[in-house]
Image (cartoon, coloured by chain):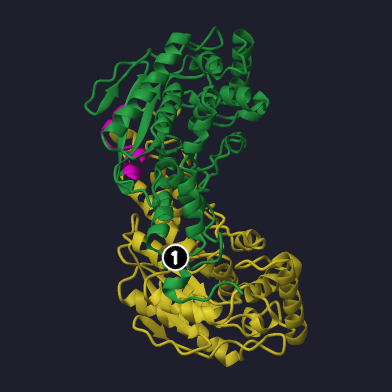
Chain colours: A green, B yellow
């Protein structure tokens, strides 16, 4: 981070015609993006949300309200522009980049980047979700996607995902990397009932018992109970951070990926911008551990990158305030007595 | 409210390619605005934020961190486009309508609507802030402004204000109309220290003792311890509601005005859309009593309408989702098992 530029923006905020700190998180974001980019008022002309799609072997345990084929079907929906993320990205002036990193079936439709590591993870109740090599390959897909987009001129990225079963994998990661109990880490996901929640809890407990992930080794956790799209998001975050590009973290699944990114490269958290706090009960705790703050309070639980893409607008607000507001001096307004 | 249209949108939301209710508050807003306007996907082409400006006699008690003249100076800043509300309104594609309803000095600058009821309120520690006639006149200014804007084609309004000392008047209203103690109702405002908070608490207690407002009569509360710009916002809300136009409620001061509106016309709450929850401690309680939910979590405490104008974007997102998303049937996506 460019500490000099951050200090410059911090001081400049106090000269603008408003009580000190009264724009709250907008002021903090303006300082953070100045630190990330080294520019006082960065111009986020080209924005993208990356939707990583992958399947989960653990769905065999009855952990989701939807059938596995929905992952593939939703990828087609993304390609055709009909999903919520497409609608919100159009509104934001952002592009949707869909990556098949691990869908269980073949996806052949224009506009989807096929970077498939594997046709879905293995059921982690019976062994590791993926091999170490596969986990690293999925991380590299994310890094590569980030770098390709940045080379193509995208200056801010948002994380997104699609993967039936992925709140179960995310809850497993969150439990292991934040130290909360499995019960505390599990929520309703796309809408399972109490029996479904019990199946999620049991599956995660068995996954942990069978695989014995090392909680001090984020890569070990990722490969044993994680997901391909989660690994892809982790890579995307690392790739953005390495290139000094802000990356907006979407909901619960993206936050699990962000916890893995923090484990692999602690400084990556400086490049993350929070979006919303979802209805998943362990989301807030995870955000607090990452030190990133949500700005939206919409009770959303969709994923896809929807919360992150809505946040682009607020990040642009934050920068625009610095660019366009009058100072006390220029406007002839008296300061605090 | 158009209950039939609300039910139509509620059912339609469940056909869209996402888990039921997963867009949270965005879904609720889409249903609310359909009920208000009677349209499935209302088009909010012309948007305005109304900034009511007025001064407060109670500043003589040392309740604000800024000198009174800042109200007038900020009105000039609004007219010149240099304030935070101007920046955020430009981003939102909304117009800023500044109304001098009670500034202590004369404001003569193009673009400001002069509808002055009085050169600032009286110090409510010594008697009522305004007469009943003045309070009604200020309410009527707000109603008239709403009706003029709606006749001019504005289809959604946001509340905003400027008035040094107005968190003190708002805290007095909030204490009386929500039943919390004066201590619970008072916060730092634009940034007073602990001594300043004590002065605010003492001023409000004296104001209540001297004027004995009737807590069951919102107009009595408004005239005795309120403010001209607060009355103007109350009128604006009533005018919007009477014309079936959604009105976005900004921060703590606007919420105090909304409590008065609820007292005068309980059904007006159906036309209010929440924006953010500010750093003022009694704001959340007030929102809960109104039954309106904040969508932004930005720790802002500026007022002017800044939180409300940021919310326009999210309201447009909510409508756009209904307008543009694919259904499970049209996209060929399987539904919940």
x and y percentages locating residue A58 in the rendered image: 51, 16
Q: Is B237 a magenta residue?
A: no
- The quadrant holding residue B198 is bottom right
Above or below, comparing residue B217 to residue A30 in the picture: below
Res. A265 visible in picture: yes
Q: Nearer the viewer, residue B277 or B271?
A: B277
Toward the front, the furthest residue is A4
What residue do we see at 66% from left, 68% from top? Answer: B192
- The quadrant holding residue A220 is top right
Look at the numbered disc 1 and give the secondary structure of its residue. helix
Q: Main secondary structure of the magenta part?
A: helix
Toward the left, the furthest residue is A110
Q: Nearer the viewer, residue B247 or B91?
A: B91
What residue do we see at 51% from left, 26% from top? Answer: A265
x and y percentages locating residue A323 in the rendered image: 38, 58
Q: Nearer the viewer, residue B46 or B94?
A: B94
Above or below, comparing residue B26 to residue B282 in the picture: above
Q: Quadrant of the C terminus of chain A?
A: bottom right
Q: Is A86 a magenta residue?
A: yes
- Pointer 1: what residue? B84
What residue do we see at 48% from left, 48% from top? Answer: A6
Q: Nearer the viewer, residue A119 or A155?
A: A155
Chain at tag 1: B
x and y percentages locating residue A216 in the rendered image: 62, 18
Q: Is residue B140 left or right of residue B225?
A: left
x and y percentages locating residue B318 in the rendered image: 40, 51
How packed mark 1 is, by other alpha carbons closer than 10 Å (few <14, some 14-19, many 20 or more), is many
Region rendered in magenta: A71-89
Above or below, comparing residue A227 to residue B160 in the picture: above
- The quadrant holding residue A205 is top right
Res. A26 visible in picture: no
């Amino acid at each position: 981070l460019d500490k000099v530029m951050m200090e410059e923006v911090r001081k400049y905020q106090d000269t603008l015609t408003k009580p000190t700190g009264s724009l709250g998180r907008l002021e903090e974001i303006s300082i953070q993006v100045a630190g990330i980019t080294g520019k006082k008022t960065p111009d986020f002309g080209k924005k993208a949300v990356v939707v990583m799609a992958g399947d989960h072997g653990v769905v065999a345990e009855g952990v989701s309200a939807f059938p596995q084929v929905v992952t593939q079907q939703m990828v087609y929906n993304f390609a055709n522009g009909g999903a919520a993320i497409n609608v919100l990205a159009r509104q934001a002036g952002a592009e949707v980049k869909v990556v098949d990193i691990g869908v269980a079936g073949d996806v052949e439709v224009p506009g989807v980047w096929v970077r498939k590591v594997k046709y879905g993870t293995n059921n982690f109740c019976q062994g590791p979700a993926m091999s170490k090599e596969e986990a690293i390959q999925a991380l590299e897909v994310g890094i590569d996607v980030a770098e390709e987009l940045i080379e193509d001129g995208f200056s801010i990225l948002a994380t997104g995902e699609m993967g039936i079963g992925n709140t179960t994998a995310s809850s497993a990661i969150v439990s292991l990397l934040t130290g909360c109990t499995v019960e505390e880490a599990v929520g309703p996901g796309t809408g399972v009932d109490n029996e479904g929640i019990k199946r999620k809890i049991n599956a995660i407990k068995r996954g942990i018992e069978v695989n014995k992930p090392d909680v001090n080794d984020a890569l070990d956790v990722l490969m044993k109970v994680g997901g391909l799209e989660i690994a892809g998001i982790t890579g995307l975050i690392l790739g953005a951070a390495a290139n000094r590009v802000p990356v907006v973290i979407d909901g619960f699944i993206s936050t699990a990926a962000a916890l893995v990114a923090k484990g692999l490269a602690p400084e990556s958290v400086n490049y993350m911008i929070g979006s919303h706090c979802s209805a998943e009960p362990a989301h807030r705790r995870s955000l607090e551990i990452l030190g990133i703050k949500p700005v939206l309070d919409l009770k959303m639980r969709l994923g896809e990158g929807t919360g992150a893409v809505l946040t682009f607008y607020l990040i642009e607000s934050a920068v625009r305030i610095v660019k366009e507001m009058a100072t006390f001096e220029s406007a002839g307004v008296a300061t605090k007595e």
